[in-house]
Image: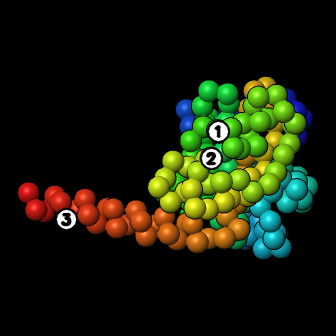
Amino acid sequence: MSSCEEKSFIKAWSKSNPETRANRYASDLLMPEVMFKKSAETIRRVDFNSVRTLAQIFKMSLTASAIRLVERGPLPAMLICSSPTEIEWTAKGSETKRLWPQRPTSGTYAHDILAGGDREASGDVAASAWFDHPLAERYQVHEHSVRGFGDLVLSLLWWRNETMLIKMDEYEERRDARRSDDRWDR
């Protein structure tokens, strides 16, 4: 895929673009779930190096392969496309559906790239740098961010330790139950 096509593809995954549905259909057709899962089972890290390997196998773009890995892969992950002013879109796996990232803060590699830093950077960061949640400050996520096209940055977040996701789910369930109980007491 040419760089011009990749640029269009990245923008096409935005929530407001009507071609998103067509892109998902094409991904399903070109990276069938059964075949993709078999290839993804060999992945031990969710980072753009793994995504590049999958992109070569399926002859797909980096963005399409990253989305597929996050949504259908065996490890808990999230893909975030950020601009300097906002999060353009996210792709989430089933384990991360309840999480809503905030715009990259100074504790993230994405922030550094958006500020003109290196084109690519990775490492563990505080989960609170990405998520405004009471439990996030206790945990870390692995971030691998790359400069996309123009002013966009793609960030893969991977939970090496799923404890944070489990604890956050429990926290949200308790909070939802308290809200439900409050409604019945009125």
In the displayed structure, 111 sits above or below 63; it is above
Mark 1 or 3: in front is: 1
Which of pointers 2 and 1 lies earlier in the amino acid sequence?
Answer: 1
Q: Quadrant of residue 181?
A: bottom left
Residue most extreme to the front: 138
Disc 2: which residue:
129
SS category of the residue bearing label 2: helix
Quarter holding the N terminus? top right
SS category of the residue bearing label 3: helix
Q: Quadrant of residue 55?
A: bottom right
Task: Please state which amino acid type lies under the numbered disc 2.
Answer: Ala
Task: Please state which amino acid type lies under the numbered disc 3.
Answer: Asp
In the displayed structure, 7 sits above or below 129; it is above
Asked if the residue at tag 1 contacts the one at tag 2, i.e. Cβ–Cβ closer than 8 Å, the answer is yes
Mark 3 or 2: in front is: 2
Tell me residue 20's x, y (percent).
62, 40
Disc 1: which residue:
105
Instruction: Name the residue rendered at 58%, 72% in the picture.
Output: 163
